[in-house]
Amino acid sequence: MRRAHGGGGCVSGRSPAPVLGVRALSRATLARQHLLARAPAEVGVARVIEDLVGMQAQNPRDPYPALAARLEGFTPEALEALYAAREVARLTLMRGTLHLVTARDARALRPALLPVALRALASTRFGKATRGVDEAAVAAATRALLADGAPWSRADLGKELAARFPPYPADGLALLATLLVPVVQPPPRGLWRESGAATCTPLDAWLGGEEPVAACDEAQLVLRYLGAFGPASVKDVRTWSGLTGAKEIVAGLRPRLRVFRDAGGTELFDLPDAPRPGAETPAPPRLLPEYDNVMLAHADRGRILPDGAKPEGWAASVLVDGFFAGHWRLDGAAGGDEARVEIALHRAIDAAEEEALVAEARRVLGVLAAGADHAVSVRVGALRDGPPRGF
């Protein structure tokens, strides 16, 4: 038997990691996001929200078009019913931003993410202005103020705390307090056909008692992330979660994960049994909201942003063939007689793609503006009045 010698060969017991190109990564992530094929209606809203490890909700209505893109049979009333039953909540989680999560995840995810949010606050002018304050005393005062479960505006809460903790400023104290004490933003903010000012109320008061839920540790959080957004690099994990120890966490999980590489050689990690469809799997057009985590959850966004693509600030995104292709606007959905989707593409698409995109826009109108007259326009260029702010 001949042995190989020299030539830079390396003998190891480990096979080289398979390479996943951009299209393969696109399809893998879209499949987990229910954006290749929508989840069947019987899966339900709550399950989809948990599959996604929450939904970005700093724009309070963003989850409605996000769910319309991902769930067959979705209606705004279905999510509003979960709010009414207090089975979902909006609170500060990943990257210190507001997310919509189920009641179970509200309790499970927060402990692992609180240090990230506090660290993010500390780097802002608000955090610097409250440096040195007695955090335990602020938390105790906040609990006392919110004890009856009534909603408070952040301004009113800050005013009360500033009177108790001079010379610290009200705005910084309010931000700190709403991290130290678990709070949610209750409805009507977050409803589709109704809204209101942002207020806060204690998480336990909103969800009802102390239902025992096991806290999700950092390793479990990373596994949840990979299930929703993988395959992903250590930098991707850090981008989504803010966890400073992402490298060490992934190293500890490595024996439980599949390892791949992207075309540039970066290691990618994934759950062994997660879906990884073929690179040529069709990806139907989708209309996503202004802040959708599929657009934000990776350090390398090549799986969603093709080369040269530059989103116009933060505006609702159009996906064609699984990749960002432009922006869209929904006008007249809140109870008007006419509702319109305007689509502004960054590149030309073929006739079949445009036909499918118009059909998707009409479907979205049927979900979010049922009962109104519908119109759809598609062109290459910018949105006529610039990027809209929310729905």
Image (tube, rainbow, N blue to C red):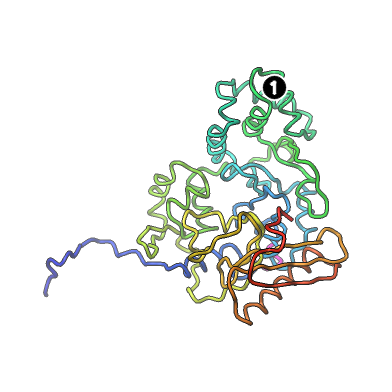
In the image, taking residue 33 as reference, residue 2 lies left or right, namely left
Main secondary structure along the magenta-highlighted residues: helix
**How many C-alpha atoms fall within 10 Å of the one at disc 1: few (<14), some, or many (≥20)?**
some
Query: Is 143 placed above or below 335 here?
Result: above
Residue drawn at x 56%, y 69% as measured from the top left: 322
Q: Quadrant of the C terminus?
A: bottom right
- On the image, the x and y values in percent for residue 338 come to 85, 66
In the image, residue 32 lies in the stretch drawn in magenta? no
Between 290 and 17, the residue placed more toward the observer is: 290
Give the residue type at disc 1. Answer: Ala
Q: Quadrant of residue 292?
A: bottom right
Residue drawn at x 40%, y 46% as measured from the top left: 247
Between 360 and 257, the residue placed more toward the observer is: 360
- On the image, the x and y values in percent for residue 318 come to 63, 66
Residue drawn at x 80%, y 58% as measured from the top left: 77
**Secondary structure beneath label 1:** helix
In the image, taking residue 81 as reference, residue 326 lies left or right, namely left
The mark total stands at: 1
In the image, taking residue 325 as reference, residue 7 lies left or right, namely left
Q: Which residues are magenta?
A: 40-44
Q: Quadrant of the N terminus?
A: bottom left
Q: Identify the residue at the far right of this view.
A: 337
Residue topped by disc 1: 162
Query: Is 11 placed above or below 109 here?
Result: below
Q: Quadrant of residue 214?
A: top right
Q: Identify the residue at the far bottom of this view.
A: 351
Q: Quadrant of residue 283?
A: bottom right
